[in-house]
Image (spheres, rainbow, N blue to C red):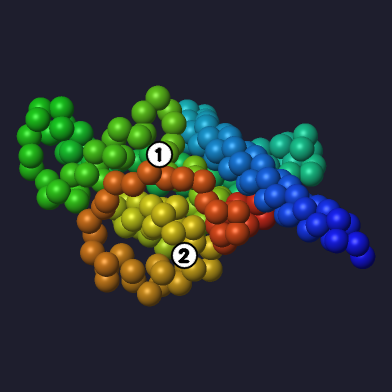
Amino acid sequence: MKKSESLLSIKYADWIKQLKEKVQQVQLKAAVNVNYELLNFYWELGSDIVEKQKSAKWGEGFLRKLSKDLSVEFPNMKGFSKRNLELIRSWYLFWSSKSEIEKQAATHLEEGKKVLPNDKKQIAKQAVSQMTNGHPPKLIIQIPWSHNIVIISKCKDLHKAHFYVRKTVENSWSRSVLVHQIESNLFEREGKALSNFEATLPKVQSDLAKETLKDLLLL
């Protein structure tokens, strides 16, 4: 091979590498945007299910019928199984139901009083400010649906759940790593104080990025 041809080959290989990285970034951005929209939709759907069951007093038969009707309309989507609708309802209730600490914090924040420990007050303030205008907390729509399910299944305390959501975004944890950290009691070992941070797009090579794409392929 001539020297000029060798240089062209190297330049071409470099260009292909750059294109690959750009495509991966585009795929990830698209997946993150779809994840945002999907989880916002799940939030609205969870709210609707709760309200309709409350006002119409529909029982388990309601979710079964809803699952069947939605599956007929959208046969290629797996997110409308009865089990997933139950999870959507549980997820919505978990994050939208304010604990007594949150209610107390909301009242005292308005009055300018300081009655809660700093970490409890911070998480309560975040929860109160984020759950406005019918939208879910900002952080929970930055992680895949499967991660969300793990967290609400294994964390009964809102403060603890926030900790693991934040850590997942901060460290780009895969689902298996998240499960391990919860089961190894990281929350109890590291302490319960929260820190503020700016959530950024996960790296293309990260497990969280890969599982965000994987999750959406199952819809």
Q: Position of residue 122 (x, y in %)?
A: 22, 44
Q: Residue at x 44, y 31 (%)?
A: 135
The image quadrant that residue 38 belongs to is top right
Report the Cα–Cα distance between label 2 and label 1.
Answer: 19 Å
Q: Which residue is the site of mark 2? A: 178
Q: Residue at x 52, y 51 (%)?
A: 202
Q: Quadrant of the N terminus?
A: bottom right
Q: Position of residue 120 (x, y in %)?
A: 19, 49
- Locate residue 207 relative to residue 218 in the image: left or right: left
Q: Which residue is the site of mark 1? A: 137
Q: Residue at x 46, y 45 (%)?
A: 200
- Locate residue 1 relative to residue 151 in the image: left or right: right
Label number found at residue 38 = none
> Height in image: 146 above or below 96?
below
Crowding at dot 1, Cα within 10 Å, few <14 / some 14-19 / many 20+, comes out as: many
Task: Identify which amino acid the numbered label 1 is placed on.
Answer: Pro
Q: Please identify the residue farthest to the bottom as the structure is shown.
A: 184
Q: Please identify the residue farthest to the top as the structure is shown.
A: 133
Tags 2 and 1 touching, CB below 8 Å:
no
The image quadrant that residue 182 belongs to is bottom left
Crowding at dot 2, Cα within 10 Å, few <14 / some 14-19 / many 20+, comes out as: many
